[in-house]
Image (cartoon, grey):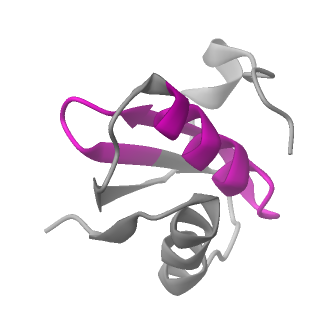
Amino acid sequence: MKLFSRKNKTEADAGPQVVLIVEGMHCSSCGLLIDDELEDIPGVRSSSTDVNAGRTTVRLEEGAEVDTAALVAAVQQAGDYTARPAA
């Protein structure tokens, strides 16, 4: 886990993205834990969680094939959270 080691935002804002709806978050620390878990997945460039909106935006490396189920599992691994892809 790499708590508080956010990646360079200009690099992180490029590339395809997956948006997840996340339930069970209570504070900004929840968001950081989720981002750290997601950013440990190969092919994930960055993750940005908005606790108030209940959403996580996961930016992927160009050409990366990351299974959505792996992203959901990573969110659940971070704590007592549930996640699903946004419509």
Residue that appears at 48% across and 74% down? 72
The percent coordinates of residue 77 (x first, y second) are 63, 69
The percent coordinates of residue 43 (x first, y second) are 76, 61
Q: Quadrant of residue 67?
A: bottom right
- Determine the residue located farthest toward the left in the rendered image: 87
The one of 3 and 61 positioned closer to us in this rendering: 3
Q: How many marks?
A: 0
Q: Quadrant of the N terminus?
A: top right
Q: Quadrant of the C terminus?
A: bottom left
Q: Is residue 18 above or below residue 73?
A: above
Q: Which residues are magenta?
A: 29-57
Camera sees residue 12? yes
The one of 17 and 50 positioned closer to us in this rendering: 50
Q: Is residue 32 above or below residue 35?
A: above
Residue that appears at 78% across and 30% down? 3
The percent coordinates of residue 46 (x first, y second) are 64, 39
Residue that appears at 81% across and 22% down? 5
Q: Is residue 56 above or below residue 83?
A: above
- In the rendered structure, does residue 24 fall within the stretch colored magenta? no
| Residue 40 shown left or right of residue 9 in the figure | right
Camera sees residue 61? no
| Residue 63 shown left or right of residue 34 in the figure | right
The percent coordinates of residue 18 (x first, y second) are 41, 58
- In the rendered structure, does residue 33 fall within the stretch colored magenta? yes
The one of 12 and 37 positioned closer to us in this rendering: 37
Residue that appears at 77% across and 63% down? 41
Q: Quadrant of residue 82?
A: bottom left
